Amino acid sequence: NLSEKLDKALHTLRGHGQITEINVAETTKEVRRALLDADVNFKIAKEFTNRVKEKALGQDVLTTLQPGQLMVKIVKDELTQLMGGESEGINLSGTPSVILMSGLQGSGKTTFSGKLANYLKTKKTKKPLLVACDVYRPAAIDQLHVVGDQIGVEVYSDRENNDPVAIAKAGIDKAKAEGFNVVIIDTAGRLAVDEAMMTEISNIHSAIQPQETLFVVDSMTGQDAVNTAKAFNDVLNFDGVILTKLDGDTRGGAAISIKSVVDKPIKFIGTGEKMEAIDVFYPSRMADRILGMGDVVSLVERAQEQFDEEEARKIQKKIAKNKFGFDDFLSQIQQIKKMGNMKDLMGMIPGMGKALKGIDIDDDAFKHIEAIIHSMTPDERANPSKLNHSRKKRIAKGSGRQVQEVNQLLKQFDQMSKMMKMMQGGGGKKMMQMMGG
Ligand code: GDP
Ligand code: MG
């Protein structure tokens, strides 16, 4: 998978204190291979890595203090740029604003039509109308009605009519007459690009002149997605791309290639079958996803502003000697509080986001934690294993918390110690180095 590959490619760099020109060349080669594996078009991958290399050498990566980080940042920035830079919304001007869906059969048009209607209704307080223009299968009309019922959005269909252009027009007329301010037109697709489908969608397009024409594409179709996007764009000159089925560990390669080939923004992503599984597309988040390394760059930036290097070294030594106790935990908390929300911060560490999902640490919790630790004797703080039930009860009483919370803290402390030990061992050592300089 691309994330792992890139991670591996960059790993070498992150570990090294020094980077040579050979090193840069090698890493960019790895990056290119990773992009190719993720179905990114060859030419795009090549151009991309060339740009990264140029930037890296131009910015004096070789002489900078932390070349690995700079390199990571360059790759991430370039990737973000490649996918469009900023996120772009959809055009909701027009009364009503008409949004036309296009794409192959099974790409997710009907599902996304529902998701978008739901999104506009709840987030933008719009009154959308869904229009069923897939006239070839009765089941397609039923499907849109099911979706509409689910989200409480009206659906216009006409089972007696088999002319999608006429249905689309009638739908818009209905919207005008009844005060719907957004019309979302779901259309039929076929399994592959063919003339009949292109003629039909093009006829609908020119008849209704939508404010927004969206091309919906299944991100699991890889390189094919690019060819399909090109075919539709040649005919429709669409306004934006919807990447569906980006749930699970779907490759992100399609996002990169499509943007590069048709030069149209990706506007939304679909991340599941449910109506809520819709997200605005953010290029920088997608870059993070593709790199699979969390927001390492900003973590480093923030950590370096605040983190006391001396402290870091001291703690590191203690962990190594298994001498990490509650006093250190307390001073860690103080450091972390300076940096902002802990969970946010830890979430930026590669692979840590998932690990933290079950653990709930918020700022308020810090107060309670500090109270509990302050109720421990110095000996107990240094040797948490001494905390038997009667000691825990005393501490709970002293801090005005429940025994249960004391237990919870001990558990968290245990988890944190383990995590820190882990960080000392494998990739985390580098984290510490980055934090401590
Ligand atoms: P259409 O033929 O273009 O209208 O495609 P549909 O909306 O009928 O979707 C085809 C299939 O893909 C259905 O089974 C959907 O539930 C599923 N689907 C659509 N979008 C997503 C998504 O974002 N994630 C997942 N996992 N499935 C999706
Ligand atoms: Mg459909």
Image: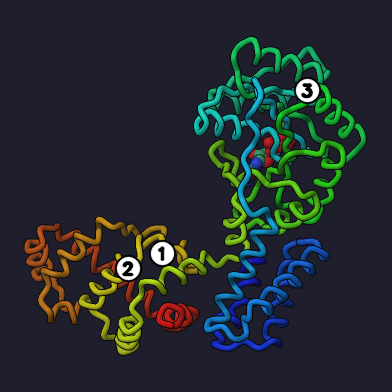
Q: Work out whether residue 338 can be spotted.
A: yes
Residue 308 located left or right of residue 212: left
Q: How far apart in space, not on screen, are marks 1 and 2 (Cα)?
A: 9 Å
Front one among 16 and 143: 16
Q: Count residues near mark 2 (Cα–Cα under 10 Å), then give few for <14, some for 14-19, many for 20+.
A: some
Q: Count residues near mark 1 (Cα–Cα under 10 Å), then give few for <14, some for 14-19, many for 20+.
A: many
Tell me what residue is drawn at x 41 percent, y 71 percent. Answer: 303
Q: Earlier in the sequence, mark 1 or mark 2?
A: 2
Front one among 137 and 96: 96
Residue 124 located left or right of residue 39: left
Q: Quadrant of residue 424?
A: bottom left
Residue under circle 3?
Answer: 208
Q: Count residues near mark 3 (Cα–Cα under 10 Å), then give few for <14, some for 14-19, many for 20+.
A: some
Front one among 63 and 289: 63
Q: Work out whether residue 192 can be spotted.
A: no
Q: Earlier in the sequence, mark 3 or mark 1?
A: 3
Residue under circle 1?
Answer: 345
The circle on residue 158 is: none
Q: How far apart in space, not on screen, are marks 3 and 1 (Cα)?
A: 48 Å
The circle on residue 336 is: 2
Where does residue 319 sit, x and y in percent of width and height? 32, 84
Where does residue 47 sit, x and y in percent of width and height? 78, 67
Q: Quadrant of residue 292?
A: bottom right
Q: Is mark 2 within 8 Å of ligand 1?
A: no
Q: Quadrant of the C terminus?
A: bottom left
Front one among 285 and 218: 285
Q: How is the image coloured?
A: rainbow
Is residue 137 depicted above or below 383 in this figure? above
Tell me what residue is drawn at x 84 percent, y 47 percent. Answer: 230
Where does residue 273 sit, x and y in percent of width and height? 60, 41
Tell me what residue is drawn at x 53 percent, y 28 percent. Answer: 121
Is residue 15 depicted above or below 285 in this figure? below
